[in-house]
Image (cartoon, grey):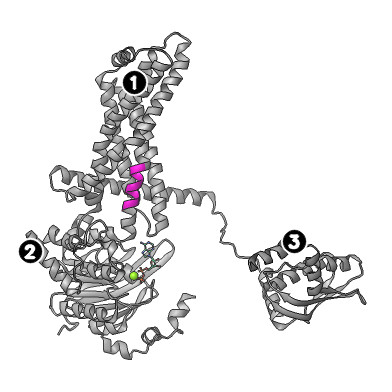
Amino acid sequence: MHRTDRKRTVGAPGASGEALDAERLRCGPPENGEVRVELRGPWTLDRPLPSLGPVEAALARGGVERLRVTDGGLGEWDSSVLVYIEDIEAMAAERGALVDTGALPRGIRTLLELARSARGRPIERVEQPRPPLLVRVGDRAVWAWRGAVDGLEFGGEVAAAVWRFVRGRARYRRSDLLLAIQQCGAGALPIVSLLNFLVGLILGFVAATQLREWGAEIFVANLVGIGMVRALAAVVTGVTMAGRTGASFAAQLGTMQVNEEIDALRTFGIPPAEFLVLPRMMALGLMMPLLALYAVVVGLLGGAVVGISLLHFTLAEYAHQTYRALDLTDLGVGIFSAAVFGVLVALAGCYKGLRCGRSAAAVGEATTSAVVIGIVSIVVAMAFITWGCNILGI
Amino acid sequence: MNQAGGPTKISIRGLHKAFGAKKVLQGVDLEVPEGSSTVIMGGSGAGKSVLLKHVIGLLRPDAGEVLVDGGDIGHLHEGDLNTVRRQFGMSFQEGALFDSMSVFDNIAFPLRRHSGLDPDGVAERVRECLRIVNLHDVEGKMPAELSGGMRRRVGFARAIALKPRILLFDEPTTGLDPVMTALIADTIRALTEDETVTALTITHDLQAAYAIADRIAMIFQGRIVFCGPPEAFQTNTDPVVEQFRTSNPIGPWTEAEL
Ligand SMILES: Nc1ncnc2c1ncn2[C@@H]1O[C@H](COP(=O)(O)OP(=O)(O)O)[C@@H](O)[C@H]1O
Ligand SMILES: [Mg+2]
């Protein structure tokens, strides 16, 4: 109730507002070039400030050299008075008039002085002068070099862990591996289905509109088939897993870093690369090919929907054409890419998690950059694989 | 009684560590004799935890060295470090329990990895450790179900499970009630009765410090400004030590904050 009342005063500076102004501000006529401004009544931030109109009018009449701000029975006051006086000062300065605040209560004078002294001094901005170009380039180079060394170190640790695994001596928990497999397997099916179906559909549709011009509609099956099997199923699934599982790996390990669990692990002489990274990497490296295989099927279905509904092939015709277009090497390349993407996404997630700072915000950052790095490395790896296949003629 | 007269177990010389522009350690020198119990005191953010993490090689020094049994920890390869760490047990400020494991599995973790005990032996040792820190019926609980003080005690139990030669305790008594604080202090004291067990403990609690320590070291502005037996600590007139000891809000500690 009270609150709404107050709102109304603020919101409607109508008649009642002006009446209030007159109660709190009295601005006398100029006498010998001096105008008296009397402040009275309560001056608190929860009330609207009186309008500066009367003061401005007095100044506008001209011939005013001095504004004397005095205490005409001030009630409760707070910084709203200071704000108001500052406004008066600014206005007076424009007209070349002086403001005398000597007659105000001591508290207000001290605060005004404080405000003035702070204003005189330029506010120290944290902004530092931009270092010269050479320094910046050097800094970036050092930074990039450190990053590269750190990444290599991580790679080395993981390689050592893999080597121990190959010799059957890796220390990790089977349950961690199973949990990671579960996380990146069945749980991911719905989103992987949706995305790959749509990609197959889009690919089919785009191909159909183009190929129809040449009367070559049946090659939609070839295009969708080869596109999905060789590359797109793996890429789309990989990107999905980067956003889903890579991010969750980064968050898990980042949280462990914040809780000092990683430190505790190391005090027991267990390398995190072995105990934490290895099972996650294996899980994603194993599950990605299976997911990609599934994604291929769903993607081909998406293409078939276009072939059947838009181009009026029968399912058998479309399937037969797809079958003729593909061979096992295509599938092999797709599956291989998927495994590589899986390992890369897992490594990006784990790396960012392990190098996470010691705050909740840092976990968020680690998660975000794990996704970005995961996706970028998928695309780069895809380029390399395509290039390699080209050279090998497969 | 342990006297601070054994051969040097841990030797820290001229240790420097900065995080970015923030200089945390600026030339720490500390000798820790074998079989002694040293308490490290200092304000929050003074770098006590950072110092302790250097002793076990979790952090690498920017400059200076950390010698354990004469070997430099700071420049060891991670693989060799893991071997050296077998003789260490460390408890962390917030417990640092493995969140995905039950209390039992947490304490059993180092035992299963390194002790060579059979499952029965492991279970027995886990129960023994839990008894030492006076925790009952928590074996099956997950860390998230415990209070901060309980987690810290489980962390303590996990640190001593393997009966390590070197014990590092980061604020084991913070947030515990007076009775539990006394219990933990007594436990640390009892562990270091063994001439071959060396302990480094961080605490803010003066009472606990007097109970635990053969020697008290005070860290201030990145250096050790005092190191000596508790009696000397109690009579020392260095303003840094005095302010800390008398809980005075005015003095070098509070000036340094400005
Ligand atoms: N891993 C880290 N990265 C960056 N800064 C750190 C790190 N660890 C500690 N610090 C900083 O070092 C200082 C000392 O920390 P710490 O040793 O934890 O203090 P305390 O004496 O309370 O245990 C703090 O200012 C902290 O912010
Ligand atoms: Mg600390």
State whether residue B43 appears in this view. Answer: yes
Q: How far across and down, in percent of the image, does residue B144 sit?
A: 29, 62
Q: Which residue is mark 2?
A: B121
Judge if badges 2 and 1 mark residues of a common chain. no
Q: Residue at x 25, y 78 (%)?
A: B180
Please tell me whether mark 2 sits on a helix, a strand or a loop.
Answer: helix
* Residue A210 image point, x, y percent: 47, 15
Q: How many marks?
A: 3
CA gap between label 2 and label 1 equals 59 Å
Quadrant in the picture for residue B200: bottom left
Q: Is residue B229 above or below residue B59?
A: below
Question: If you read the primary sequence from the N terminus, does the residue marked by circle 3 or circle 1 appear first?
Answer: 3
Residue receiving disc 3: A12
* Amino acid carrying mark 2 in the image: Gly
Query: Which of the image's four quarters has the N terminus of chain B?
Result: bottom left
Residue A185 at x, y = what percent?
A: 27, 39
Q: Amino acid at mark 1?
A: Ile
Q: Is residue A83 left or right of residue A245?
A: right
Instruction: Specify the segment rendered in magenta.
Output: A244-252
A376 or B224, nearer to the observer = A376
Whether residue A354 appears in this view of the structure is no
Residue mark closest to the camera, 2 vs 1: 2
Residue A251 in magenta stretch: yes
User: Which quadrant of the structure image shows residue A384?
Assistant: top left
Is B80 one of the magenta-colored residues?
Answer: no
